[in-house]
Amino acid sequence: MRWMRAAGRGLLALVVVVGAYAAPGARAGDCDTCGRGPLTLATAGDLTGYLGPLLRGWNRTHPAEKVTLVELPDSSDETHAQMTTDLRGGDRGRFDVLNIDVNWTSEFAAAGWIRPLPPSRFPLKTFLPPVVDTATYDGRLYAVPYVTNAGLLLYRKDILAKEGVPPPRTWAELEHDAKTIAPRYGLGGYAGQLLPYEGLTVNAAEAVYSAGGTILGDEGSRVTVDSDAAREGIGFLARGIREGWIPKAALTYKEEESKQAFQDGHLLFLRNWPYVYAVASAKGSKVAGRIGAVPLPGRSGPGKSVLGGSDLAVNTHARHPDSAARLIAYLTSEQVQREVLTRGSLPPVRADVYEDPELIARFPYLPTLRAAVLTAAPRPKSPRYDQVSLVVQAVVHDALTGQETPAAAVRRLARELDAVARR
């Protein structure tokens, strides 16, 4: 979860006035149950190193509510494993506030691991509308959006300018340019994150969505993937590997490996998260000043990204739930959300940040990202999402490596997802 990082410099006063959020059974004057006190915040590895300083700022002005940061592995799968192991242990566990992948909200809520939150305590109306849906389950708010994300198509604008062609808007245009232009410059055509891990689930879902299909419906109880759109989307990726305009190395790529290949000047096109634009544009990058970003292409026009990002949730057994809510309100305040972008290169959830001319001048991809987020779709919602993702990874990988045809893979995917839904 490369995007699960926050930003911060000096502490800003928390101007959100929050009411009591007492633990069950709280009594007035009972300091053990009034909901205020120290916290632990668990997150995936903070690769930009900005979250620690932000929390130190909070700690200076909230000495009775100090937060201890617990960094888990960088890998989404490993972070999920450690969080769920702790939460299954019952009692309080190690973690009070959890910075969770947007796709874990349904799973954690259905299992009873995180507590429902009062919407009135958080500035939900200031957020980009699609992000709020990632924090709900069964009609209730179980988390608060913290950062969002949408996949973009990064491209070598210097090369396309030399060729006199615009960035691709459709799969056909992407495929043509990857086949014909990239080889002339000694580059691979196109890559995403195709190693069998969560990134492959994201890439596969985007391909299905961009062809007009879906994977699951009704909170995971209905399987919808057996469609022409799914066969076309998975077939697009499989054909790229087979024909070579998607390098076979992409089968080993996660976010960082694919970012490095693009940053080192080995790819014409890359599907990745917006943080790559900032990193690849920085001083020392071999492609600095030579890259652009557009929405993902689709079957017959702009495609549809998967909605990424992370939500902040409160452990059902958190020691001090009122402090947890106060911390979440702080992390989603306007100024801190600006720091999420400027210090962490992560897409904030507050809509007004995307309209700031100074920030747009510094991060030119913001309008494109805003449009991508507003049209993005969540990964398949399911209380068994971890099992859903493992099925998608395994089946799609077999299609990409030629062990199954896309049509056979989609039929198998429907059967195996149906078995997960029935458990």
Image (cartoon, rainbow, N blue to C red):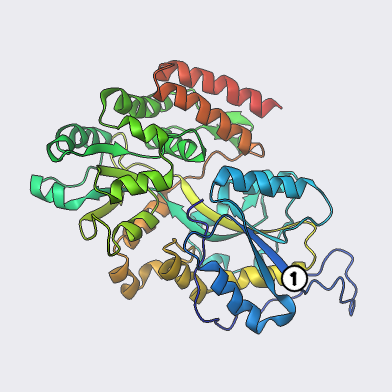
Q: Position of residue 112 (x, y in %)?
A: 76, 48
1 left or right, relative to 369: right
- Position above or below: 360 against 274: below
- Position above or below: 386 against 119: above
- Position above or below: 126 against 58: above
Q: Quadrant of residue 292?
A: bottom left
Residue in the picture at 46% in, 36% down? 200
Most foreground residue, 349 or 405: 405
Residue in the picture at 61% in, 54% down? 72
260 left or right, relative to 99: left
Residue in the picture at 36% in, 44% down? 258
Residue in the picture at 57% in, 65% down? 124
Kindly identify the amino acid type of the residue bearing the numbered disc 1: Asp
Most foreground residue, 248 or 221: 248
198 left or right, relative to 305: right
Q: Position of residue 16 (x, y in %)?
A: 61, 78
The answer to whether any part of residue 224 appears in the image is: no
- Packing grade of label 1 (10 A; few <14, some 14-19, many >=20) is many
The answer to whether any part of residue 58 appears in the image is: yes
Q: Position of residue 141 (x, y in %)?
A: 66, 56
Image quarter of the C terminus: top right
Element on which disc 1 rests: helix
- Position above or below: 302 against 312: above
Q: Position of residue 317 (x, y in %)?
A: 80, 58
Residue underneath mark 1: 322
Most foreground residue, 246 or 172: 246
